[in-house]
Amino acid sequence: MSERDQATLCWPTDSLRTGAPMRPEPARYPVARHTENVLKVAVVAGAVVLLILALVWGFQRRLIYLPDTAAVAPAATVLPGARDVTLETDDGVRLGAWLVPAGEPDRGIAVLVANGNAGNRAGRAPLARALAAEGLTVLLFDYRGYGGNEGSPSERGFARDVRAAQRYLAQETSPGRILYYGESLGAAVVTELATQIPPGGLVLRSPFVDLASVGREHYPFLPVRQLLRDKFPVAEQLAMVKAPVVVVYGANDSIVPPEQSRTVAEAAPDLRKLIELPGVDHNDSTLVHGPAVITAVTALADHIAPT
């Protein structure tokens, strides 16, 4: 190889030695800039995702619990013959409640009603009226943070609240003659109670498998199970309940998928009846306080205490 060829091959090294400017490699810097831009976008996107997840973590209970916080009217002005009672939880929270006496003939059975996640007990007055007309005593109560009550909603708080309601009814009626009735989220509340304090029977209206399962239906873009503070594992807990169970749900439920209510029913060791209401959505009056629901409750009442 000639000296000229060797000099040509060694040019980059020689140029560094002599201080001569080095020619840039054409493709190198544009690729580096592109990579840097991609990284910046990824960092910004990651920060946005983390911010969204932090907000969901911090404010999730405002998405789950939708209380009507206004104080309710006196019981007798809404349900003639009903009276106002005050429940006290084991952590010192005072809860407003209505006790609705049974009509004649009195079946000697009391129904503890656990509300869903929205409204307050005033919205359950038609249900209580219909049950009382069938000879059942009914206790409507509001959770902490609902219906003018102090406190903030949570799974643990609701467990304390429903125990206060059960204690009150147990002073009036033997536990074996108390039915637990839970609607939607309330189905989770009374199922957990039933694992510790068995009722005469359990009626679950529009139950979900657990809170994460129904949450994924409405927020499929979020890691719901990992984010949730409150779990409400209905199907898992119902498997431990020995009391007779009735499940009622709407075939067109747009909030709790009907297949979840069926899965819950399958978990019950003593399922007495699974009732599907065709064409009915979650908050339709037919499912809230319609004849099929009232019949389901009274039939279970007759099963545990034949008239």
Image: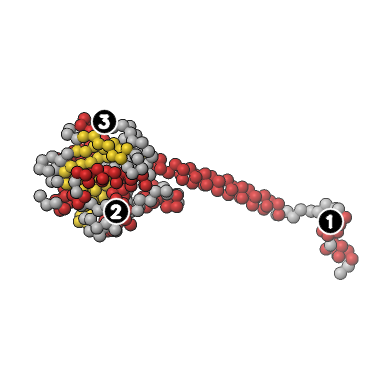
Alpha carbons under labels 2 and 3: distance apart: 33 Å
Q: Which residue is mark 1?
A: 16
Is label 1 or label 2 in front?
2
Q: Are marks 1 and 2 in contact (CB under 8 Å)?
A: no
Q: Crowdedness of circle 1 by 10 Å Cα count: few (<14), some, many (20+)?
A: few
- Residue drawn at the location 16% of the way across and 49% of the way down: 301
Name the residue at the bottom extreme: 1
Q: Secondary structure at mark 2?
A: helix
Q: Residues within 10 Å of mark 3 (few under 14, many from 20)?
A: few
Residue 268: quarter of image: bottom left
Does residue 38 appear to the left or right of 170 in the view shown?
Answer: right
The kind of residue on which mark 2 rests is Gln
User: What label does residue 196 carry, if any?
Assistant: 2
Name which of mark 1 and mark 2 comes first in the sequence: 1
Q: Residue at x 42, y 52 (%)?
A: 225
The single residue placed furthest to the right in the displayed view is 3
Dot 2 crowding, Cα within 10 Å, few <14, some 14–19, many 20+: few
Total marks placed: 3
